[in-house]
Amino acid sequence: MEERIRELEERISLINSERERARRVLDDAVDSLNVPVTLGQSGDVSDVLESVASRIRSLINVGEIAFFLISEDGLDFSREWCDPAESADFFESERTILVEDGTVAWALGRNKPLNLTSSDGTSLLIHSLIAQDEPLGIMMACIEGDPGGIMDISLAFVTVVLGAAAGVIKNSRLYRMINDLNDELRGKVSRLQESEAQLAEANQAKDRFLANVSHEIRTPLNAILGTAAIVRGKSPAEMDRALEVIKDEGHALLALINDILDLSKMGAGFLDLDEAPFDLFELLEALEGSYRSEAKRKGLDFSLDLSKDIPRWITGDPIRLRQVLSNLLGNAVKFTSSGRVSLTVKSLRSDGDKLTLSFSVFDTGIGIPREVVPRLFKPFSQADGSTSRKYGGTGLGLAISRRIVRAMGGDISVESERGRGSTFSLDVEVIPCDPPVPEVYSPVDNGRIRPLSLLVVEDSHTNRVVIEAMLRDMGHDVTTVSSGRGAIRALSERCFDGVFMDIQMPGMDGLEATAIIRERGGPVLDRDVPVIALTANVMKEDKERYLAEGMSGYLPKPVTREDLAEALRNVEPGDPRKPVSGRYVLDMTGLVERMGGDRVIANLVVKTFRSDLAKIVEKIKTSVEDGDFRKVRMGGHTLKGAAAGAGAWGLKIVGGRIQTAAESEDGELLNDLMDELVLEMDDFEHFFCGGEEL
């Protein structure tokens, strides 16, 4: 009986001991559930892992611990934390072995502890870190003592602790990602606000610019229209004075348009500088002569000071350099009511073949407030609104000048103070050179020595009248047409020494007409006739494109007598040739030649084409109305081939244009070509009704 009592007492003591142990485990487990969350708010994963390691050690008897985490992009699996640090090599070695044999992959897929033996016989505990079914990494720990003595409830709480830690790590990553996104969003909002402010400032500047441009355009227009209105019936002397006013104001308008075009080209990155030898002294003397007279009219002193070491001949772009200096001198004279204006040129330094020239324009004018100097070289900007109203101008000159100077390898700056004048300085790199050998030209005498037969193709009636009058006054025989179609017809009926071809015309434009002129076996009598482009497109790439597509020369609008004479310098008058009537409509002579001289077969070909023409055209019209581009293309191809076989050049050309327009599915152009097709058919029928022999 006493023995039985002792057994019961021992069992009660053991139960109490186990209960106390379990209570401690539960207390430690409950404590461990809160610490990672608190530490995790800092976003430092190392703090979380250190706290988790401490709690694991309070639950089970382990020594060295290491955590390996999968990177956020899933591309890396590396050691994140280890204690003690000197055990890192051991864990790295074991990790490699466990990865290769698939143990790590197995552990990552299960949220359970795994006991195994390391390569050196150490007992290891492996456990995954999983949050919301997403594996984040594993824990590796060295077990001290008997692994079998670890209570199941302790391992269960290890799973709970590691799960909580995994949740904290995931939340920490999400928290960091949200912070990064918020920072990025704040940056974008800040940049957007800055952009909105800049846009508002730019819009205000452009509004001022448009107001200034409107004023600058209306002023010379008012002078031109007003002068034209009052000059009617006046004396020749008064007429001459009126024409001078109109000419001067027209040049003012052209200068404004050139400024706007320059700014547009520079904004698109198309500022091209010429490199040619020029006489710097001649350029400066011309500027002096121009602005000295302007200064004298205002009672100002004007001086030009040149240092002795400046070379006379340099290589560069004289037009652009003159443009910059003219802008600075013009502003100096305009904004100075008393005192003086001066231009000083010095040689600063040499760098190999290059030489740096310094230009300074000084005036005693109104000056510029210091606070507005930084925006002085921005487009559309002036010192203030009252400046533009009192003195005029668009605020483009200085912005354009700075870009030109920088393209020349220099820069432009200003020193100024309100009421004390201004000094604008610029440095440019140039290359001294020898004067070029002068070219000897034969005298042109406005073209009267070499009368030419010329064709002017221009859709603007006013421009046709002006250009025709200039050319006739120079002694040339001039024919004018208003379209590309008219040009092809004229060139197929007689030969010309040269053609002035407008580029942008409704219907067949200048480039399309030129391509037909150059076409081998085409309707024109002389496919090598010089074709000179007349265009308001003045970009360098436009000129290069026109020349590449078969044109012989290029003239930007508006043109002068001198421009026309220069363009015709190398055009030689041809031998008189008899016109070939009707070749554009129907080239019967060529058709007979292609038929081996058999006129009967040629007549049969023409009659067959004439009988089929109405059907072909009707199919094309129906297809255009239905919007069936495939059938339109086929119809255009059929018309082009049939007309070519019959020698009906006008219908062949319009058939080819219809085919091309259908291939690009250009419905608007096809509608226009239907009108041209009607004209070509009418001309073809009139050929027969007019009694022309076949």
Image (cartoon, rainbow, N blue to C red):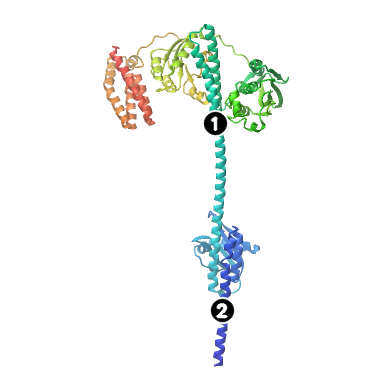
At numbered mark 2, what does the secondary structure look like: helix, strand or loop?
helix
How many labels sit on residues? 2
Q: Which of the marked residues, 2 or 1, is nearer the chain's N terminus?
A: 2
Identify the mark at residue 18; answer none if there is no mark. Answer: 2
At numbered mark 1, what does the secondary structure look like: helix, strand or loop?
helix
Indicate the quadrant where residue 400 lies: top right
Place of residue 274 in the rendered image (x, y in percent of width and height, measured from the top left): 59, 23
**Distance between mark 2 and mark 1 Cα atoms:** 87 Å
Relative to 573, 373 lies left or right = right
Place of residue 603 in the rendered image (x, y in percent of width and height, measured from the top left): 28, 16
Nearest to the observer: residue 62 or residue 529? 62
Q: Residue flagged by tag 2: what amino acid is it?
A: Glu
Q: Residue flagged by tag 1: what amino acid is it?
A: Lys
Residue at point 51% right, 67% down? 112
User: Which numbered mark, 2 or 1, is in the foreground of this view?
Assistant: 1
Place of residue 683 in the rendered image (x, y in percent of width and height, measured from the top left): 32, 17
Crowding at label 1, few (<14), some or many (≥20) Cα neighbours within 10 Å?
Answer: some
Nearest to the observer: residue 151 or residue 608? 151
Q: In which quarter of the image is the N terminus?
A: bottom right
Residue designated by label 1: 206
Indicate the quadrant where residue 503 lies: top left
Image: 352 above or below 14: above
Place of residue 415 in the rendered image (x, y in percent of width and height, measured from the top left): 69, 29
Relative to 622, 202 lies left or right = right
Relative to 273, 461 lies left or right = left
Crowding at label 2, few (<14), some or many (≥20) Cα neighbours within 10 Å?
Answer: few
**Could you tell me if residue 89 is visible in this image?**
no
Nearest to the observer: residue 411 or residue 368? 368
